[in-house]
Every structure is written in C-alpha cells, then in structure tokens.
Image (cartoon, rainbow, N blue to C red):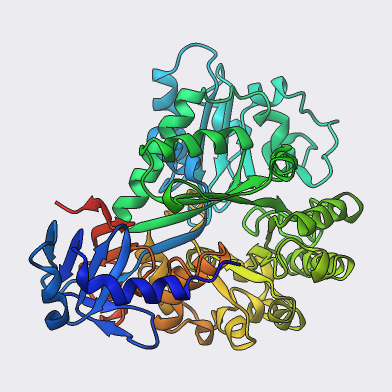
Amino acid sequence: MLRLAPLMAALALSAAAQPADLLLVNGNVHTLDPARPHATAIAVRGGRIAYVGDAAGAEKFRPEAKRVIDLGGATVVPGLNDAHLHLEGIGARELLFDLEGTKSIAELREKLAARVRDAAPKKWIVGRGWIETHWPEKRFPTRQDLDAVAPDHPVALTRADGHAVVANSLALRLGGVDRTTPSPSGGEILHDAGGEPTGMLVDNAMRLVLRLVPEPTPQEVEQHLIVGAQREARLGWTAVQNAGNSFEDSELLRRLIAEGKVKIRVYDAMSGSDGSGRKLLAAGPVIGESGGRFTRRGVKFYIDGALGSRGAALLAPYADYPQSTGLLMQEEAKFMPFLLDALRAGIQIGTHAIGDRGNRTLLDWYEKAFAAVPAAERRVAQPRWRVEHAQILAPDDIPRFARLGVIASMQPSHAIGDLYFAPSRLGKGRLAGAYAWQSLLQSGALIASGSDAPVERGEPMIEFYAAVARRGLGGFADENWHLDQRMTRGQALRAMTLDAAYAAFEEEERGSIEAGKWADLTVLSADIMAIPEAEILKTRCLYTLVGGEVVHEAK
C-alpha cells in the first residue's frame, strides 16, 4: 500500500510559503492525531490540510487565504464516514413512499389508502420503512390489511430492515404464491393457521413478488443518487461506503461524481447476488478516481437475514419462535470459489451476518479462504475483509475478528432500535454477545461504524449517541441491555472516522486531521466529546468540507 508519510511531511514543511485556499480559525478541533490531539485552526491548500495548530501559527496564512471562516468556537472533527449504507435507497426514501415512523397497522392502511388515491390504475405500489416493534397490534401486517384499502393495485411494502416484504393478495397472485408454493432456499413464506400465505415474505422469498416490480429508470436512479448524496452532506457525512451496488448503478454514480453532481466521497461495494461482483473481478478495482472521491473495490454478500423478521441464523432456536433457527443464504461450495478469486484479485469482501450461527459460519469460511490463499499469492496481503453488522456473536467467536484481521462493520443505531425486540427474539442468555462493541474492541478488533440507512435514519448524531449511550432516543435501556458494552466517546469518534477510513484502505488519506491528508472536515454546533449524552441528539452540522470544498453550509 502506498505510504503517504513522506508526502505529508513535505506538505507540512512547505505550507508556510504557500497561500491557503481556506483558513478555519477559532475552532475546537478534535484531530485524532496523537501528536496533536487538539487544535484551534486549520489551513487548507489544494484540497489537503496544510496546517493544524493554534491561532498564532495560522496568522501567516491569513493574508492570502481565499476564504477565512471564523468558527466562533464550533467543534471540528475529522470528516464523518458512514461505513455502511445504501445511497440509492436513501434518495429513493426521500422521494418515494416512505413508511418510516408509521405507528400502527391502522396508520399503515391510512397511508396506503392515500397512496392508492393518487396512483394510476393497476400501478404497482411499493414502499419501505415500516417496523412493527412498537405497534399496538403486536404483529406483522397481512395481505388482508392491505387488501382492505388496496384490492386492485399490486402492493409490496418492505420492512425497515429490508429483509421482509408484506404483499397484498393481488401481488401474491401475480407472483404465483399460494398455499402450495414452497419456500425458496434462504427464504420463508409465512402462513396462517389455515395454511394460507399471510402476505409476509422473508429474505429470498421476497423475490417472488419484487421481481415483478418495475425497475426505476436510469433517470430516476440518477435522481435518487444525487438527492441521497445531498442529504448525506447536509448531515455532516463527508464519505460513505455503499454496500451492495449494481455494477451499472456504480458506473452511473462514478459519472455523477466525475461531473461534480455528487460531492461526497464514495467507496462502492458491488452486489454479490446479481452478477456485479463477477463484473468487478473481471474489470478490476477503481481506486481514488476523481480526486479520491470514487473507489470501487468491494463485493457485498449475505449469509443470513435480519433479527426482526427472524431470518438471522441462530445457533439455538428463536426464544419467541422455537420452530425456527433462522435462514442461511449461502452454500459453502458455491461461495468459496468467489472468496478465493477475490483474495487473489485484491477485492474486499463484506458479508452481511447478523445471527450467531451466521457469524460463526462466515468466520469459518473466511478462515478457510485465508488458509487456502497464502499472502504471497494475494494482490493485497492484508485483505481487510469485513463482517457487515456482526450483531449477535457467540462469546467464543469474538476474539476471532482480531485474530483473523476481520473488520466488524457495525451500526450503533441497530442496538437502540433492536433493544425493544431483541430480548424476546433471543432470550436474556444471548444478549451478552449482542452488539458487543466493547468486547470486540478489548479483544483487539477494529469497528468501522455506519448507519445502514435507509434501514435506519442515517443521522450521524444518532449513531454517535447510540454508541456512547446505548439507550433509546428517549433514554430507555433495561437492566439486561449490557451498558458495559458502550463505547467511549473517543472510540465512537474513531469508529466513525479513522477506523471507517481504514475499512476502505484510506486511513493515510483521511480519518484524522493532519497535515497532508485530505481536508475532509465536519463542523458541529456543539462539542460531542463533552456535552451531556442527551444533547448529542440536538447537535447540528454547520459545515461539511470534502477536499477543502464546502459542500454544505448551514443557513
């Protein structure tokens, strides 16, 4: 890997003789640089940091600086980096049928009825974002719930986690789903007491109806990507790691970045389930294009489903559904050849694994692949493969992450959303290995922190709060929720910056505020390293800078 230390040192030495593009003064700067953990001023030249220090040292940059921003004591942190999200889905959520925040089945029906009134005859109605955890009905919605208000339009509404769909009777009929339809491998068709499908399709069974939904046009996908990226910049994310893109949409995103229509940095991982991963192996990685704003070198797979829809693969049965241990969505004989090819080609693998059985199986397969392809045969000696989510771990598997060099790519907001149903799904005994951040960190593992938006809201202050408080947004956590697994604020910030950059092979380019690195900075209205936990959620993004360019400035 290219080492940037000589370049960074040269830039630091020559900075005083060169004019700055931008000067930030009077700030409260948390650098994550052990040599200078705190500063008050930053100078930027040519997209990179030219100076980090105090007001006196910054004065030499002021006369020729193109712009000077007096931060008035605002807090600056390294540019926040969402290590796991779905960018096109975020934009689609902003523009389409968003069911986030729906409070009951009754409200779901009201929203669907309103959508039907505006829909063309026979047009598919698709939406996403519902989650039944807090609903008074205490159950999944059914096809009958949807039929009552939408009998003549095919309807498919995806659960917030993206691992279950509820379809109405017309959509099921079009998909050929009836009481005799077998559940596909890695999926489940739920049935009622009479043996009829309820309308709930879990994991691979979702394809039975979703394959019929018209794909968005390239123009619509482009709009989704632009709107999604604009939202990320407003929130303070300077970079995102896109989990599971199609190769075609990746090429579109690549063009939008080159044209300056998407301003944030994107680390793109291809979907392993639609052929895009094989296309990446054939084409080879793209690294640091468009001034370091576009990289494509990963492939995203799934090994199991989600905990909320009971698709996560568990070592023991679900406590509230003892007839099931969840779903494995991969077969070793089919998966292993791709893993070996990826190791030889320098392609990073990130695999969704939520249940303890899913995580153990995945770590077993990773370990076999590493043993089969020695470092001398790899394009990248340390491949930095990832487990996406790593939510429920058996205690014996926690030390394996550090031993194998596998990154735990985790999303803190899952813990504060799942705390309302995980105890009933797992029982108290398995909660010790649930969202086990501190245990992983103490074992030597690295955690890259993301949001999984649009599954979650995708707001960085929610992610930071969740990591350090491990409580619901209202402050709730019961005695079984293992508050000892909370991160310190330093750990949480590092997971969202420097360690997220490491997960994308970019820790020498960004992730801390040091001379020579890209000037990717997030400016916040309050000092999240010091304020009370509840106030973290009130903190706003004032400026987002990518390569020294102000891509968001709060009004």
Can residue 308 be seen from the camera position used here? yes
Residue 126, placed above or below residue 459: above
Q: Position of residue 218 (x, y in %)?
A: 51, 24
Farthest residue, direction left: 63
Q: Position of residue 43 (x, y in %)?
A: 22, 68
Residue 96, placed above or below residue 300: above
Instruction: Find residue 532 and report its image quarter.
Output: bottom left
User: Which residue is more in the foreground, 376 or 156?
Assistant: 376
Count of marks placed on residues:
0
Taking the image as shown, residue 460 lies to the left or right of residue 397, namely left
Taking the image as shown, residue 402 lies to the left or right of residue 344, namely left
User: Which residue is more in the foreground, 14 or 215?
Assistant: 14
User: Which residue is more in the foreground, 132 or 362?
Assistant: 362
Residue 535, placed above or below residue 506: below
Taking the image as shown, residue 234 lies to the left or right of residue 252, namely left
Q: Position of residue 429 (x, y in %)?
A: 69, 80
Give the position of the N terminus as an image quadrant: bottom right
Can residue 467 be seen from the camera position used here? no
Q: Position of residue 286 (x, y in %)?
A: 59, 47
Residue 170, placed above or below residue 286: above
Farthest residue, direction right: 333
Farthest residue, direction top: 121
Instruction: Find residue 183 and report its image quarter.
Output: top right
Q: Residue at x 71, y 21 (%)?
A: 173
User: Which residue is more in the foreground, 386 or 279?
Assistant: 279
